[in-house]
Each structure stands twice: as C-alpha cells, then as structure tokens.
Amino acid sequence: MVSKQLDDKSYHQFREFLEQQCGIVLGDNKQYLVKSRLAPLMAKFDVSSIGDLVTRTLSPVERQLRSAVIDAMTTNETLWFRDEYPFELLKKQIFPEFKGRRTPVKIWSAASSSGQEPYSIAMSSQEFQQLNPGSLPGGVQIIGTDISNTMLEHCKYAHYDSLALSRGLSAERKRLFFEDGDNGMMKVKEHVKKLVSFRQLNLLGSYSLMGRFDIVFCRNVLIYFSPEIKTQILKQIHGVLNSGGYLFLGASESLSGLSQDFEMLRCNPGIVYRKKT
C-alpha cells in the first residue's frame, strides 16, 4: 500500500538535509510541499511511502536518489520577462552605459531554472542592439547556472510547449525569437541561444571558476535561504561583480540587514543594486 504520510521526525530530518545540501529553509508546516514534490519519485525508485523515501534520501550512498530529490525540491515554474522592469532597465539604462565597449558585457543568471530568465536577457540584448546597431561591438555573453542538472538539460534543449510559452511571452517576441521545434514544441532561435551557456552551480559553493560579471540576476532565489546564507551569497556575488556592476533581486526581495556592499538605485519602475566602489 502506497503511503504519502510524513511524520514529524522524518520531516525534521529532511528539513536539515535540504538546508545542508542546498541552503533551502523549509518552514514548520511545509509537509504538504515535501509530499507533493516527492510523491512522483516513489514509483521511480520503488518506494512504498514518503517516509521510506526520506529515510533512503538521508543515506549518503543513495546518490541518484539524492540528486532526484534535490531536483524535485528546487525546481520552480518561472516566467518569460518576469516582472518586466529588469529587462526594460537593461535596454533603457544599463546597456547604454556599455556603448562602444569592445569586450563582451557579461551577465550571470544565478538560478536559471528551465531557461526563461537567461533567454529573456538574451532577447532583451537583441532588442537593444536592433534599435542601436553597432552599439555593443563586444556583444553580450550570458551564463545561466542552476543546482539541478535536469533543469540545465531543459535549458540547453531550449524547447518549450504552448503552456510555457503562454507565461509572459508576447506574440511578437514568440514570432521573432522562436521557431518550430520537436513534438509540436517551439524552440529558441539559434541567434538567441548562442548568447547563453549553462553550467551546474550550487550557490552555497565556490564561485571562483565563474569569472567576473557586469550584471548579475539573482531573482526570487534568496527567499528560500536563511539570513546567514543570504549574507554569504551576497558577499560572494559582490566578489564576482566588476566595479560598478549591477545586481537584480526579485521584486519582493531586499538587501536590508544583509549587505552594505551595494547601493540601491530607485528606477521608474523597479529597483536595481549597484556594487559600491
């Protein structure tokens, strides 16, 4: 008999595991979230209860299961051009600051999920350059990272179904930046796709191999972490940003009480942070 119950002890152990592995902090009453995210793994790993699945996950020898569980708990639906204003700020305020630059403008999407954010950034750069031909002779380079290798494979494949395409993507952008793909899906056109590369990264780890960036998108990510881990991540982002570089957070996120290393710029609309020099 299949059981989707999760007792308090198992839930507490799983909360500790998840925070240690990827920094995500679950609240006291999020059992329903764990059950809904992990239930699809029960058949795949031939487990009859959520409790047994959690017990096996805690074993360090269960690498494949651990990876699948982390994927399930960190995968989130996202939107194209989420909140819109960051992408408008790129085109109207930030990209113009780099006019004439002969080296690439480097941008990091720090939690790329299924690819909507980094590809939205790429499309924004294309829109800016179409309106301002030759303005960025060095071009734009975008790196998308995620903890989930499964999501990264989706990003690289760059195919999206009609439901995904309906979430924040205008008909005009769909026409300009997508073409027919496999199995009735649409795929990102090559001139957009080639601007973005992807790699696996746990934000709790080292960023030393990432290089340096002019702009970092770390949007709707910090909300999952404790204040201590938020501060750690922001310090590391500060370390990879070039002088005067920009940081975008989610619309509901703030640096208040977490970091003094950035100045807040109020824009119309929205907010962006700039590395203090």
Image: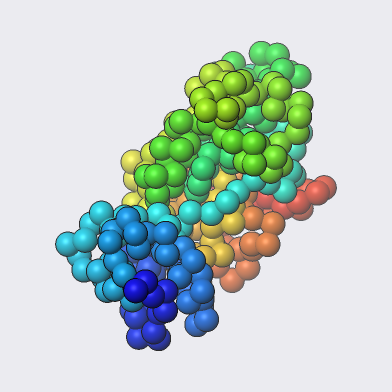
Q: Which residue is drawn at 57% across and 51% down?
A: 77
* x and y, in percent, of residue 214 in the image: 55, 37
Q: Which residue is drawn at 64% across and 28% down?
A: 123
**Place of residue 276 in the rendered image (x, y in percent of width and height, measured from the top left):** 58, 51
In which quadrant of the rendered view does residue 161 lie?
Answer: top right
Q: Position of residue 5 (x, y in %)?
A: 42, 79
In the rendered image, the residue lying farthest to the left is 61
Q: Can you tell which quarter of the image residue 257 is in?
A: bottom right
Question: Where, quadrant-wise, is the N terminus in this rendering?
Answer: bottom left
| Viewer-nearest residue: 17 or 205 | 17
Indicate whether 191 appears above or below 254: above
Rendered position, 52 above or below 244? below
- What residue lies at 35% left-to-right and 85% top-to-bottom? 9
Q: Is residue 4 above or below residue 89?
A: below
Q: Which of 101 and 220 is in front in this view?
A: 220
Q: Colour scheme used in the picture?
A: rainbow
Counting from the top left corner in percent of width and height, residue 36 is at 49, 66
Let me know if residue 87 appears in the view. Answer: no
Q: Is residue 62 left or right of residue 164?
A: left
In the image, is residue 20 above or below residue 211? below
Q: In this view, does 39 lie to the left or right of 81?
A: left
73 left or right of 205? right
For the image, the number of numbered tags is 0
Q: In which quarter of the image is residue 65?
A: bottom left
Q: Measuring 67% from the left and 30% from the top, which residue is drawn there? A: 124
Q: Residue most toward the bottom?
A: 8
